[in-house]
Each structure stands twice: as structure tokens, then as C-alpha cells.
Image (tube, rainbow, N blue to C red):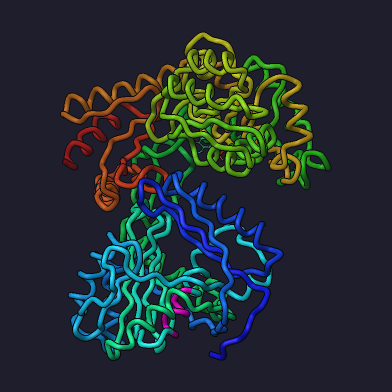
Amino acid sequence: MEPEKQEKLYCVKMRASRDGEHVSGAERIVPAAAVPTVAAQLAARALGHSKGTPDFINVKVERPGEIVRLKALPVATHVTHTPAEGYACAAELLRGVGFTRIDEIMALFRETYNMRGAMLLDADTLERLEPDRARGVRATCMDDADSLAKGTAAGKNHYAEAIVLATKVQHTPGIVGEICVSDDPDYVTGYVATREIGYRRITVIKEKGDPSGGRIFLYRGPREQVPETIRFLERQAVIVEDVPPLEDGKSGMRWDLLADELSSIEASGLGRRCRTLDAPTGPTAVVDGKRLVVFSSNDYLDLARDPRVTAAAADAARRWGAGSGGARLTTGTQPPHVTLEAHLARFKGTEAALTYATGYMANVGIISALVGKGDAVFSDELNHASIIDGCRLSGATTVVYRHNDMADLDRKLGGARAYRRRLVVSDAVFSMDGDILDLPRFLETCRRHDAFSMIDEAHATGVLGATGRGLCEHFGCGHPDVLMGTLSKALGSEGGYVCGSRLLIDWLRNRSRAFIFSTAPGASAMAAADAALSVLEAEPERVGRVRENAAFLVAELARLGIKASTQSAIVPILVGDERRAMSLSDRLLGDGFLIPAIRYPTVARGASRLRVAVMSAHTQDDLSRVATALAGCR
Ligand code: PMP
């Protein structure tokens, strides 16, 4: 650690606070020419901090004097999943390098959460050595060589900043160890560092959203040396070289981390696997040789195995081939695609329609074609994942409004007039709750604010309205600008679609990447959906039957003392705990019923549920028996 004379470097330090409480702090060592930019960047960082807007920002620029260059500590990662595991891991690391009185150190560590700087602690006597206990000791005046070379402070990199600090601290005379947790509510990773074991990242050491953080510097040495230790920490300029990239381990290392994470997913009841159903889609199935009544299928009208539908699929495959051979704009458009689109538009009462390979792709493709950077998309908090992903991919600002709360939507639209285009998107039937959108108020709110409106009719088509035309038919009201749906549920096939004006469809054909750059769905899927639409038009009584079945199930459950409700074919039964939901689902399987446990991340943590999907083909006997089995689970 050779001191070097540096004539042209400056240390730019930013500290921000609100009501005297620390909000943000950062610093860079940069060449003189970069000082104005970096000072502005650090101020901007303070203004945008997740802990809130500061009322005081201090940006200080000073010449650092002698600069010491250090090589970054080696890095290793310990994967933890809860704060308790993180604490235990930190304690174990300290114990492993020979510290004693670990429980007392960890208890003192919690006390540092109220301090502005670090606690300076005698590693053996646990005597506190910092002169000002409220302020603590601060390690400042450091940067990594890489950002010095770039001369910018763009973006916070918790990882690199922590290694720079830990490296400086572990090279400070008298310091023998450090333990740290960040006070950034969004950053849950902490570390233990010593010269011997290097920098040990502990992936989870606090709850997300927790704004508390702290650190202890462990000291060993004569008392007379303490002032020099503090001077080095607070004044000595340090540049740290060779900060290793995050998790840039040997090639096997990342797989280790994945395996570790996966076992914790399993342990917390969130593991997922596919079950093979050895039967055509329908109200019954055979799993591992056992016959089950299926309450998990979205084939609400029992059309996937209807002979008219399967014959249409088979004929189309024979006539047009198994696959379409290309994207719709190249070789993938065949007569069944065109016929189905015209049929969908007629059925929904719109000028035109367009199909996608899946409903998921339709949502992603539509939203990202309609809005982008500089626009805003307003999304119900319970919208389907494909809508959420479409919003994310679009690059538009996503504003999430409270579930089905049109007053909240109204307020949020009112506060977002500056955006170029505004799109509001909602599920028609909420797929994990079975309730429906208040469409008339939704449309009125969108119109009043001049925003595009879009609904996802995945679970509404074939289920809502007297003839299964969906939510508009249910309410007897007009259409939103964009009517999206899927062929994979009540229409018994696969693929997604969008219905709307000719202009909308022309726009999507030209601008929707999920449409343009993906192979067209095969003709058999198109022909099957077309045939299913025809069956639905010829036999609208199926729609009434599925809703009657759902209402019958809710009544049976109520009779047995189980609270459930629905406005569609989806009847959720709230359980809460993930593992309990899984064990109930397993138990119901033993009783002969296939009912999936819906868990995080499909629904919020602790909001697990059994999702009972009712079909028109279920008998009253099936429904009574499943209600009894569900009642037996309490
Ligand atoms: N939207 C909603 C509301 C859904 O439930 C689903 C399917 N689970 C989709 C879109 C995606 O449709 P697909 O399965 O055809 O990709």
C-alpha cells in the first residue's frame, strides 16, 4: 500500500438528510474535469433516493492529498433467504475466524441501527471506542479504480461501493473485521469482511422495505492507536482496484447458487412441477393410473375434446400441415388464420381481429406496440402476469391502481396528464379471484381522461354474457378500444387474439413484435378455435350451464360453512399459507379431485388459495362431492 501523490484528483462527497435523519450518502474520487458532472449526478441520486426526498443535500468537493491504492478483497457469496438466516451466517463467519462473544457482538450490531456512522468496537473487550457514540465513525474518501477511470457516478452499485468500503476498512491499521447491513430499504444484502476471509456477501440479512442498517468495525490494538485508526477511516484517500464482477465465479459457481435457491423454493412450499394427465382435456383425467375429477381446466365449455372441434383440427392439419412454417408476415398466413380472424371480429362485434401464438404473447405484443417511453400504462394491481410483462416490456411508465377501484384510477389518470399516450388495461375476469371488472365505469373513466382502454377477456369469453361474448355483453355496454382474449380457455384450442378497429389491427400488424417475429400458430389450432366458436354460437346454453354450475358450487360450499364467491367460472378458496395450500391440494388429490394450489408469485405471499375452475360438463354430483371434500379439509 504505497501512498502516491495525486495532483489532479478531487474527492466529491454527497450527504443528504431529512429532518436531520440520514437519507443518502455517496462519494467519488474523480479528475478535476469530471467534478461538475459527478457533483450533479450525486445530487440527483440524493433527490431520487428510495428513502424519500431530502431537505438538505451537501455536496462537498476537496483535494484528497495522498492516495493509497489497494487491491479489492476477494469476494464470496453466502446465499441466505431470511434475515434470521443472514444473522446466523454472519455470526458463524465471525466465529470461524476466531472472534468470541459473538452473541454480544450481534446484539451490539443491532444497536448500530440508530447510529449515523459505524461502531468502533474492541474485538475482545467489546469496549466501544468511537468518541461520539451517536455519530459513530465514518469510512470516507474512497472510490474504485474503475469508476475513477470512467469519471462518472451514474447509477448506484451497492455491491462495488460496499467492496470498496470494506477493502479500505480492512486495510486500516488496527481493524480486524467488519459486519454491515445497508440502510437502503431495497437492498437486503449485507456482509462480513476480514483480511483473512475477504468480503463475504450474505444475500439476505434484513427484510425488504426495512430502512434500518448499521455496521461495526472490530478493532484490536493499543488505545493510543485509535485516533490514527479513525483518521485513516475518515480522511485517508483510497482507490480500490480490481473489484471483481458480481458472482463472476467459476462456471460451476452460478449453478451452485441456483441449486441452493431452488432447494429453498422447495422448502418454503413454492416448488413447481408438471403433472402428466393421461386423458383428453375434459372434466375427468387419469393421473398415475387414478381417475380424477378435474377442477383445474380452463376448458370451461368442454370444447377441447368436442368431436366437431377435434375433427376441424385434424382436417386442418392434414390439409395445411402440422406447423405454419413461418411468421404471419412471411409464409405463415393460411386460410384458417384469415377465416378465424373474420369470425372473431364478427363474434365480438368489432371491425377486425388479429391472432397471436398465445394469449401471453398477445398481451405482451399489444401493450408494447401501443405505449412506450414517454407514455403511461395504468394497470389493475391484480392483472394477469402477461399484462404485467407487457407493461414492463413496453418501457412506458407503469402506474398500478387499486383493484377494480375506479376512483383510484380516476385520480391517477388525473395526475398523469403530461404523458404522451395513456393506456388503461384490466382483466375482464380476474383470473385468481373470479371477480369481474366494473366495465361501464372503467370505460367512462378512460373516456373522460382521453385514455386508450384495453381489457383481457381470457376468462370472460364463453363464460360471461347471455351468449358468451364476454364482459361487454354482460353489462350491455360499448367496447373498449382493445379487446384481447385467448383461444386456449373456453374455445378449447390455443393462441391469443385481439379484436378492435381496423386501424388498431393495422397498427399491430405493423408494430407488434410478438406478432411480427414469431411463427404463426398452426392451422389446426386456428381451425379448432373457429369450430369451437361455431359450437358456442349454436349452443349458447353451455354458457348458462357453466355459470349455473359455479353458482351451485358456491351455494354448496356456503351450506357447508365455507365462504366463497364468484362472478365467473373461477371459485377461489382462500388458504393463506403456501405449504398448507399444497398439502390441501395433495389431500384433495387423494380424494379424487384435481384442484391446484395457487401460490406466490402468481398471488401475493401468504395469499395462497385453492382455485376451483368449474366446467359446463361438471355434474351436480361432481360439484356436491368436491364441496364436501373441501369442507373436510378444514
Ligand atoms: N390473460 C389471462 C387473464 C390469463 O389467465 C391467461 C392464461 N392463464 C393469459 C392471458 C395467457 O393466455 P395463454 O395461456 O393463451 O398464453
Answer whether residue 417 is magenta in the image: no
> Does residue 235 sit above or below 19 in this rendering?
below
Q: Is residue 200 visible?
A: yes
Residue 491: x, y in percent?
Answer: 55, 29
x 53%, y 64%: residue: 27
Query: Residue 310: which quarter of the image?
Result: top right
> Does residue 203 sit above or below 337 in this rendering?
below
- Is 578 left, or right, of 236 in this rendering? left
x 62%, y 35%: residue: 496
Please, which residue is most extreme toward the right here?
330
**Quarter the C terminus occupies:** top left
User: How many marks can you see?
Assistant: 0
In the image shown, does 242 or 428 lie closer to the viewer?
Answer: 242
x 20%, y 69%: residue: 107
Query: Residue 485: which quarter of the image?
Result: top right
Residue 591: x, y in percent?
Answer: 24, 45
Residue 313: x, y in percent?
Answer: 65, 36
- Report the magenta residues as a range: 165-171
Answer whether residue 166 is magenta in the image: yes
Residue 603: x, y in percent?
Answer: 38, 42
> Does residue 19 sit above or below 369 in this rendering?
below
In the image shown, does 42 or 98 lie closer to the viewer?
Answer: 42
In the image shown, does 529 or 55 lie closer to the viewer?
Answer: 55
Mainly helix, strand or loop, the magenta region? helix
- Is 591 left, or right, of 286 in this rendering? left
Q: Is residue 542 visible?
A: no
x 68%, y 32%: residue: 370
> Does residue 132 sit above or below 375 in this rendering?
below
- Is 297 left, or right, of 521 in this rendering? left
